[in-house]
């Protein structure tokens, strides 16, 4: 690694799906990871008030690194839809503002997105997932930053169960499937988080 990073590397998430995707890239390279729950990091969530994915990733990485007193990897990700001026963007996870569970929030967010795009033709529904990733040391200082994107179009109804969030709505014309219909290995090879994770792995192993 470029610098000494305590392993397992702390990842600032309690989302098991997100952790699985990061582990799928870093694990084969010998980089062990651990989520907030497994690490026993029990602090209030920070207010993610950054105007960009990068700003929120920096905020989370620094916050949890200082709280845990160890290096921390964080990401902020979401969906940008061109016809909506880039929305939901940094508000992707709380776009609808409804739901007590992750599954309920995902369903509400997808429903709002489809309602907003109701009168927009398919060819104008171009969109992309974006993932900004940040690694901070135990003092909250930024060590490395990466970014990945994953483009497609938004279809009219959810398809597939392999993903989460807006995955069931992002249609990939070249394979005739949504992101949520891709096998996990293929999704990781194409996705925004996979791209950001591979770039971060290159830095960690450099």
Image: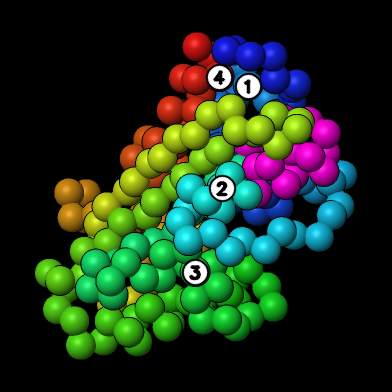
Q: CA distance from mark 1 to mark 3?
A: 30 Å
Look at 61% across and 61% down and name the residue there: 48
- Left or right: 96 with respect to 88? right
Q: Magenta stretch: residue 65 in it?
A: yes
For label 2, the residue is 57
Look at 69% across and 14% down and name the residue there: 4
For label 3, the residue is 91
Query: Secondary structure beneath disc 1?
Result: loop
Query: Over which residues does the magenta segment extend?
Result: 60-73
Q: Nearer the viewer, mark 4 or mark 2?
A: 2
For label 1, the residue is 31
Badge 1 vs badge 3, beta-carbon distance below 8 Å: no
Q: CA distance from mark 1 to mark 2?
A: 20 Å
**Residue 61 horizontal/vertical position (percent):** 65, 42
Which of disc 2 and disc 4 is earlier in sequence?
A: 2
Badge 4 vs badge 3, beta-carbon distance below 8 Å: no
Q: CA distance from mark 3 to mark 2?
A: 13 Å
Q: Magenta stretch: residue 174 in it?
A: no
For label 4, the residue is 204
Which of disc 2 and disc 1 is earlier in sequence?
A: 1
Q: Main secondary structure of the magenta part?
A: helix
Q: Quadrant of the N terminus?
A: top right
Which of disc 3 and disc 4 is earlier in sequence?
A: 3
Q: How many neighbours does mark 4 have within 10 angstroms: few (below 14), some (14-19), or many (20 or more)? A: some
Which of disc 4 and disc 1 is earlier in sequence?
A: 1
Look at 63% across and 80% down and name the residue there: 99
Q: Is residue 180 above or below residue 18?
A: below
Query: Secondary structure beneath disc 4?
Result: helix
Q: Of 138 and 73, which appears nearest the observer?
A: 138
Name the image quarter holding residue 50. bottom right
Q: Is residue 200 above or below residue 54?
A: above
Q: CA distance from mark 4 to mark 2?
A: 17 Å
């Amino acid at each position: 690694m470029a610098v000494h990073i305590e392993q397992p590397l702390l990842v600032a998430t309690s989302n098991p799906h997100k952790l699985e995707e990061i582990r799928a890239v870093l694990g084969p390279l010998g980089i062990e990871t651990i989520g907030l729950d497994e690490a026993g990091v029990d602090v209030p969530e920070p207010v993610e008030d950054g105007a960009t994915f990068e700003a929120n990733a920096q905020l989370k990485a620094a916050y949890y690194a200082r709280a845990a007193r160890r290096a921390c990897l964080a990401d902020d990700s979401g969906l940008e839809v061109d016809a909506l001026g880039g929305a939901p963007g940094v508000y992707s996870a709380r776009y609808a503002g409804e739901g007590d569970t992750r599954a309920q929030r995902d369903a509400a967010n997808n429903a709002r997105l489809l309602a907003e795009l109701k009168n927009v033709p398919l060819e104008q529904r171009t969109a992309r997932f974006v993932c900004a990733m940040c690694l901070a040391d135990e003092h909250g200082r930024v060590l490395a930053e990466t970014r990945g994107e994953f483009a497609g179009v938004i279809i009219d109804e959810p398809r597939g169960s392999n993903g989460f969030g807006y995955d069931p709505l992002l249609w990939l014309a070249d394979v005739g499937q949504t992101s949520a219909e891709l096998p996990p290995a293929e999704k990781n090879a194409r996705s925004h988080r996979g791209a950001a994770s591979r770039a971060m792995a290159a830095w960690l192993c450099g």
